[in-house]
Image (spheres, rainbow, N blue to C red):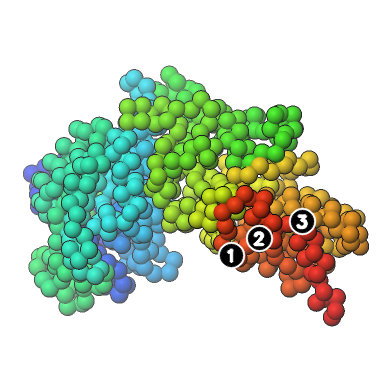
Amino acid sequence: MTDLASTPVLPLAAACHADWPRLRQMAADSLRVLTMDAVQKANSGHPGMPMGIADAAVVLWARFLKFNPADPHWPDRDRFVLSAGHGSMLLYSLLHLTGYDLPLEQLQAFRQWGSQTPGHPEHGLTPGVETTTGPLGQGIANAVGMALAERWLAEHFNRPGARIVDHYTYVIASDGDLMEGVSHEACALAGHLGLGKLIVLYDDNGISIDGPTTLAFSESVLARFTAYGWQAVRVDGHNPEAVEAAVRAALTRPRCPSLIACKTHIGYGSPNRQGTHTAHGEPLGADEVRLTKERLGWLPDAQFQVPDDVCAFMRAVGARGAAQHANWAALFARYAEAYPDLAAEFQRALAGELPANWDHDLPSLGFWFQSPLSKPIATRAASGAVLDAIVPRLPTIIGGSADLTASTNTLPNGQASLSRDDFTGRYIRFGVREHGMGSILNGIAAHGGLRPYGGTFLVFSDYMRPAIRMAALMELPVIFVFTHDSIGLGEDGPTHQPIEHLTSLRAIPNLFVFRPADAAETAIGWRVALERRRGPTALVLTRQPVPLLDRDTHGAARGAYILADVDDPQAILIATGSEVHLALAAQKLLVEHAPRLRARVVSMPCRELFEAQSAGFRESVLPARIRRRVVVEAGATIGWGAYAGLDGAVIGLDQFGASAPYQILYRQLGLTAEAIATAVQRAGTKSEAA
């Protein structure tokens, strides 16, 4: 036995031929052994799932998966998603054995500080990991986005004899993935759109943490997926020939995604843990590991070792991708000669770069004043106008809405909707599936080549929060368009009036929450979102019209700026979104009734951006010497104390709204210019008394 690093690479044909049955079995057992050892060494982890699905995983990787360990970012590689991310050692073992830059020492450091082998796979940390998985259902939903991206890019870029986009998305999913509601949302849309290059191996082991899945899960999964429009079959997951035949059959269905339910035994090979829930999420124990290795024909005391011929075989599997990659590179070179503009667009899109002059038609302040939109306009409508202007210059921006197209203004002029038979458009009808939409957007972004956005009401960000969090964790440049941002939506009442949502979203690290005050700031919000390449942005927009403000808006791109200043300001009014106009009105009231309290008005559309600026810039906008401050936002007040200070005040909403015209709601709930002016007069009394 030897470590992988010293193993020679053999041609795949020489490594398998008639010896394939023996090698595939030993490779599967190697995955089991590496998993057991890593989990046991860490004294933490999930050994059961990798041990159960190992046979099917070897078939998939050795017979079908197109990848190149030497270049994990090869554009036309197949995407492999381990949706059952708790079984991460399965993926780490496969990556290690096939030659990715994941040495044995990393497997030995499983779940330890600073390792590339965390408890659940993380996008951007470990080479070969396509998306962060672990929260169940997210991976399979991301995979739907990847398959959607592949089909759209193929439709847009492929030409006769030059299929530069031609790959599959493969998934290994668990019972838990299919129980989670997000998988229902995403998979139903995948069937509706006929995403036939999506193939899911369902590890149907019938065990979850609590025990047998029959405790809570008795539906017919195959019948459900058939109803979605999928091909759904069941095979013995420990029968490699049956698994291979099922995958080959799936490859013949170009407009039908496939679910292959692989009936397996969790903890396969363990004499006392196989088929039990204790194999799911805890180490087997040193004695059980020894017994299992003996049953598998392994040396019971050997740690992290794999037979030499298995190492050679798996390295050959990985090396096969180099030739496939070289063939693709030659194809792309011919493509670039024949279609230079398309090739340049393709490369730019994959790099996440915006085209030159993409913002040539981006509406500016002058545009708004010179157009019929110079009257008060909802920022959701302004957002729609921005999309109309920029989409023609951004050929790979794609988006949609969760059945709220007219309300969110997310359908650009002239853009068609995607359908099963036509992927030439750039608009996705997600249906009433907010969570599925968010996770699919993440998958599109993780795939690469497209800039995705999706719209719904801000209150429904609750349904999307897991996906938003995952976008932030993975640093994916997804744009979430949230409208109906406050009590300003009016008569729909408290069920639809988001109160705590801005605070909740701002609590997510690496998420920019941009709430513009008017149409001009809305355009800047879109610029910020599109120019951001590492992390998501939430654009939070009004339903009610707000007036256009005549000023220099460039400071909005820095998160906060002085909107209306005075000589020697004695107070500062800080506001976001539709409440900026109330702050300006309060400033005028102070001039009339308390001229000594000269107040600066600061618009703060994005706290995260402002906090990323230099200390000098922040001080220029919010001087520390001015302690009389009032913050105004139609949302929860928590979090604003850091800006108001001990002597300041926060005017917001720490109660639910009501059903009434929005003008009445603002007055009844205390969001008025008079209330703001009064708060300014009362603020600062503590420090002055001292």
Does residue 584 appear left or right of residue 235 in this picture?
A: right
Q: Amino acid at mark 1?
A: Gln
Q: Is residue 149 above or below residue 558?
A: above
Q: Earlier in the sequence, mark 1 or mark 3?
A: 1
Q: Which residue is mark 3?
A: 673
| Front residue of this view, candidates 630 and 679 | 679
Residue 525, percent from left and from top = 63, 44
Does residue 193 appear left or right of residue 560 in this picture?
A: left
**CA distance for labels 1 and 3:** 20 Å
- Occupied quadrant, residue 354: top right
User: Which class describes the residues within 10 Å of circle 3: few (<14), some (14-19), or many (20+)?
Assistant: many
| Label 1: element kind | loop
Does residue 38 appear left or right of residue 221 in this picture?
A: right
Mark number, residue 655: 1
- Occupied quadrant, residue 527: top right
Q: Earlier in the sequence, mark 1 or mark 2?
A: 1
Residues at marks 1 and 2 touching, judged by CB atoms closer than 8 Å: yes
User: Which residue is pictured at 35% across the width and 33% down the height?
Assistant: 151
User: Which class describes the residues within 10 Å of circle 1: few (<14), some (14-19), or many (20+)?
Assistant: few
Q: Which residue is mark 2?
A: 669
Q: Is residue 240 above or below residue 348?
A: below
**CA distance for labels 3 and 2:** 12 Å
| Label 3: element kind | helix
User: Which residue is pictured at 65% across the width and 29% down the height?
Assistant: 360
Mark number, residue 481: none
User: Which residue is pictured at 89% across the width and 61% down the height?
Assistant: 594
Residue 247, percent from left and from top = 18, 41
Q: Amino acid at mark 3?
A: Ala
| Label 2: element kind | loop
Does residue 642 appear left or right of residue 154 in this picture?
A: right
